[in-house]
Amino acid sequence: MLTLRFLTAGESHGPQLTAIIEGVPAQLPLLAEDIDRELARRQGGYGRGRRMQIEKDRVQIVSGVRHGMTTGAPITFVVENKDWKNWTKIMGAEPISEEEAEKMRRKLTRPRPGHADLNGAIKYGHRDMRNVLERSSARETTVRVACGALAKVILKACGIEVAGHVREIGGIRAEETNYATIQELQKRSEESPVRCLDEDASKKMMAAIDKAKQDGDSIGGIVEVVVAGVPIGLGSHVHYDRKLDGKIAGAVMSINAFKGVEIGIGFEAARLPGSQVHDEITWSEEEGYKRKTNRLGGFEGGMTNGMPIVVKGVMKPIPTLYKPLQSVDIDSKEPFAAGVERSDSCAVPAASVVCENVVAWEVANALLDTFGSDQLPLIQAAVERHHAASKEF
C-alpha cells in the first residue's frame, strides 16, 4: 500500500512557499513544466487582482526527481514570492527592536469580517493579526495546486483525466452544456476567460465581475470538477473515513472561501423521488458495467462506480472588500472600517483550477491506496488488470 501525503509551509509575503510530498512512486516522468502549467492556470481567469501581475509562479523541484524521473524519495516543491523584496523587514525571521516594531508598516489590528483574522489572533494570542493573515491567505493554494498537478501526472499515466469549469458567478448560471469527451471539456473551459462553457453566460459573468469591482464589492459562484476514466472501487464502504466521496468533500471544503460541496446532483436529490435519483445499471461485452445516468456523480457506497466523478463546490464572495465592512480595532476597541489588502473582485475562475487539483490529489491518493506499489509500471499494470476483471465480473 502506498499513500500520498503532503505538508505545505510559507506565508503570503514570505520568501517562498514550500511543499514536501511523500508516497510518490518511482519511475514517474515529471518535469517542472507539468507543475508550472497548473500554476499559470491558477493565476489566470477574469477578475484577478494586482498580485497576479507581481507573481509569475514557477516551481523549483529540489528533491525526489532526477533527470526527469521520480526516485521514490520525498519530493520538494518551492515557489518563490517575487514580492518578498518589499516585505523583508515586515516579514523577516530576525528579531526587531520595539522602536522598529512601532514604526512597522502593515501592522493589522482591525480584523476583516469573513477572514480568519480575529479567530486566529485569539487562538494564538497575536496582537498583530498579520501573523494570521499571512498563513490563512489563499496564496497557500499555490503549492496545493502544485501538489495537485503532480497528482494529475500520476492519474494521467493510469488513464484518468481531470477537468473543471465554472457553473455560476454572481447568480448568473450557465446553461447545461454537453461535451463529448473530457478533453473537449478541458479545451472549452480554457478558451473562456471565466472558464465557463456557455458563451452567453460568460459575457454576463464578466459584466457582473466588472460591476462588482466598480462597486468595491466581490462576488462568488459555483465550480464543477469532472474526473473520467476512474476504476470501479476506489474508496471503501467498510469505514466512514475511507469513503472517497467524503474525503473529496472534506478536501473541497478546505479550499479558502469554499462553503459547500455537492456530489452529482447533490442537494437536488432531496427534491426528487428515488426513481429520478439512482442510476440504473447496464452491462455489455465492450464496456462492462455502466450506469444509464450519472446523477450520483460516480459514487455509490463511498466508492467509485466507474462513471465520471462529478463534484461541485460553492465559493463565497471574497471577504476583502474595497468598500470595507465595519469592524473593531482590537487595541482601542473602537469601531473602524476593516483594513483593505490587495484582493480580487472575483476569484471563481481561479478557484475552479484549485478545486480541480484538490480533487485530483484525493483521487490519486485513493488510486495508490488501492493499487499502490513502489514503481509506476507495476501500478499501471495493476490498474489494467482491474479494469479487465471488472468488465468480466
Image (spheres, rainbow, N blue to C red):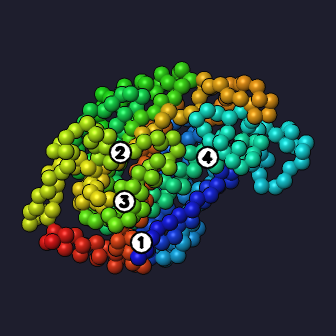
Residue 25, image quadrant: bottom left
Name the quarter where the N terminus is drawn: bottom left
Above/below status of 244 relative to 269: below
Q: What amino acid is found at the position of numbered circle 4 in the picture? A: Ser
Question: Dot 2 surroundings within 10 Å: few (below 14), some, or many (20 or more)?
Answer: some
User: Which mark is in front, 4 or 1?
Assistant: 4
> Which disc is residue 136 wearing?
4
| Residue sitting at x 67%, y 28% | 327
Q: Secondary structure at mark 3?
A: helix
CA gap between label 4 and label 1 equals 32 Å
Q: Position of residue 200 (x, y in %)?
A: 30, 28
Residue 282 in sight in this render: yes
Amino acid type, label 2: Glu
Give the spatial CA distance, label 2 vs label 3: 13 Å
Q: Which residue is mark 3?
A: 244
Single out the mark in the foreground, 2 or 4: 2
Q: Could you tell me the amino acid type at mark 1? A: Leu
What residue is shown with label 2? 262
Give the label, 3 or 4, closer to the camera: 3
Q: Earlier in the sequence, mark 4 or mark 1?
A: 1
Of labels 1 and 3, the one closer to you: 3
Q: Position of residue 139 (x, y in %)?
A: 58, 47
Q: Which mark is residue 28?
A: 1
Q: Look at 44% across and 49% down and name the residue there.
A: 252
Is the residue marked by circle 3 packed among few (<14), some (14-19), or many (20+) residues within 10 Å? many
Mark 3 is on which residue type? Leu
Q: At 62% across and 42% down in the image, what residue appears?
A: 116
Task: Tell me how far mark 2 sits from mark 4, CA to CA.
Answer: 24 Å
Q: Say which element carries label 2.
A: strand
**Dot placed on the residue nearer the N-terminal end, 2 or 3:** 3
Horizontal relation, residue 144 to residue 282: left or right = right
